[in-house]
Amino acid sequence: MSKSVKGLLVGLFSLVVLALGVSAANAYTVSPGGSFTAASLGKLNLESDIVTLNCNVSLAGSLRTTIPNLGDNAGSVTSGSVTNCDDGFSVDLLFGSAWPLTAVSYTASGTGDIVLINISNVGFQVNFLGSPVCLFGGDVGFQYVEGGLITILANTLSGDCGTGSLAAGSQFALSPAQNITP
């Protein structure tokens, strides 16, 4: 085998090893992962063109123990409930399928690592005195700070009676708390 062919093979092998190393460095470990619950801290505001509702919200789902890369599936929200809404209103969460969680960014911080995650296909129906009034849906981003605190980011949901949003800055407690590390 000529020196140039050997050099080319060594170079290609080095590139493959480097690529595998970069790929592995992008993987994130979630501990403990698995099943979780998230309960709103106080009432969550659903703001819309027709009404602002204040309700308690709890969600449940599962988290993967490994997220291969940012942009990959991190788990899903599979069930939940909305209770104690104001003034005769109620809200039904719509789970035609699970709401996927996607890891968007990761920032190491001395006070707790921060992960931005997007929840896709969030859907719910607002009812008044038991009768359906509006449907809302869309994606909702949130910030997770290691230790268990989730904060909703600015969002816009579309509905059949206008636009709405879940109040940015509203918080949830995640249980069990998760550690996410690269």
Image (spheres, rainbow, N blue to C red):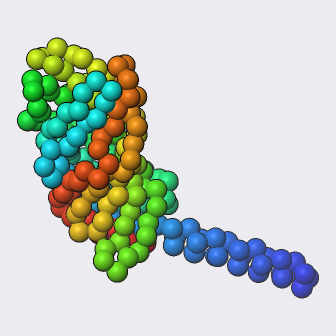
Percent of width and height locating residue 57: 17, 42
Whether residue 81 can be seen here: no
The quadrant in which the C terminus is found is bottom left
Q: Is residue 15 above or below residue 44?
A: below
At 46% from the left edge and 56% from the top edge, which residue is drawn? 104
Left or right: 45, with 156 as reference point: left
Question: 43 or 72, which lies in front?
Answer: 43
The quadrant in which the N terminus is found is bottom right
Left or right: 181, with 89 as reference point: right
Question: 134 or 31, which lies in front?
Answer: 134
Percent of width and height locating residue 33: 27, 60
Percent of width and height locating residue 160: 37, 19
Furthest residue in direction bottom, as rendered = 3
Whether residue 114 can be seen here: yes
At 34% from the left edge and 32% from the top edge, which residue is drawn? 164
Percent of width and height locating residue 135: 31, 23
Q: Residue 59 is drawn in which quadrant? A: top left
Furthest residue in direction top, as rendered = 131
Left or right: 84, with 167 as reference point: left
Q: Residue 107 is drawn in which quadrant? A: bottom left
At 70% from the left edge and 79% from the top edge, which residue is drawn? 14
Question: 48 or 80, which lies in front?
Answer: 48
Q: What is the count of numbered marks?
A: 0
Left or right: 106, with 148 as reference point: right
At 57% from the left edge and 75% from the top edge, which residue is drawn? 21
